[in-house]
Structures are given as structure tokens and as C-alpha cells.
Amino acid sequence: MTIRSAFADLSVGQVNYAECGDRQAPAVLLLHQSPRSYAEYRAVLPLIGAHRRAIAMDTAGFGDSAAGDAPASIEQWAKVACELLDHLGAWFKNSGFRVTLT
């Protein structure tokens, strides 16, 4: 299964991410530990991508993602994660499912 990698232009600048699987399938966002990058998920992206849309991102300020001007914080990282999901159209609107990133 092919892993696609790209950059998204978000509020912090360019955010590096990779995805695998059907883009119409329910999404699973993989967030790496700090100070790492999405590279730690390369082996599992195809496994999850076989059944879901697997997305792994470099958190703002880590890997190849821009840090932006705001101070690093959990709230900032969650905001950028939501921006990426929105950019990729990975939210399931009107599904009755709620996601909270904290």
C-alpha cells in the first residue's frame, strides 16, 4: 500500500503529513510523541490504511513542520491537528460523532 506524503499550508506555516488508505474511509489521526516525527508510524500506516484513512502528521515545530509564532503548547498542537483534518476533509460532519483533542 502506498504512503502519500505532502505539506499542508496551515496557520503555523507548512505542516508535513503522510496518509495511507481510502480517502473516503473514516480517518485515524496518529500523533507522535515529542520530540519526534510522523516517521515513527511508517510501519503501521499501511496496516491501518487497509481499513481506514490513516493520517500521521509532524506536530507543529517538529519533524519537517513549521513551528509558527505561537508558543508551543498542547492547545496549539491540537489546533493545528484540527486544521489539518479540516484541510484534508477528514471530518465526518453531521455524523453524530464528536472529536475532542486536548
Image (tube, rainbow, N blue to C red):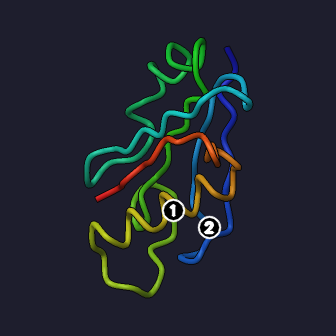
Mark 1–mark 2 CB contact (< 8 Å): yes
View extreme (bottom): residue? 69
Q: Which residue does the numbered mark 2 point to in the structure image? A: 14
Residue 24 picture location, percent across and down: 74, 30
Nearest the viewer among 101 and 20 is 101
Image check: 31 left or right of 91? left
User: Residue 79 lies in what quarter of the image?
Assistant: bottom left
14 to 31, vertically: above or below: below
Residue drawn at point x = 45 percent, y = 20 percent? 44
Tell me the kind of residue under disc 2: Gln
Residue 17 picture location, percent across and down: 58, 47
Residue 92 picture location, percent across and down: 63, 43
Q: Which residue does the numbered mark 1 point to in the structure image? A: 65
Image check: 49 left or right of 74? right
Tell me the kind of residue under disc 1: Ser
Nearest the viewer among 37 and 24 is 24
The local crowd at label 1, few if under 14, some if 14 to 19, many if 20 or more residues have their Cα within 10 Å, is many
The quarter of the rendered structure image containing the C terminus is: bottom left
Residue drawn at point x = 51 percent, y = 58 percent? 64
The quarter of the rendered structure image containing the N terminus is: top right
The span from disc 1 to disc 2 (Cα, nearest Å) is 6 Å
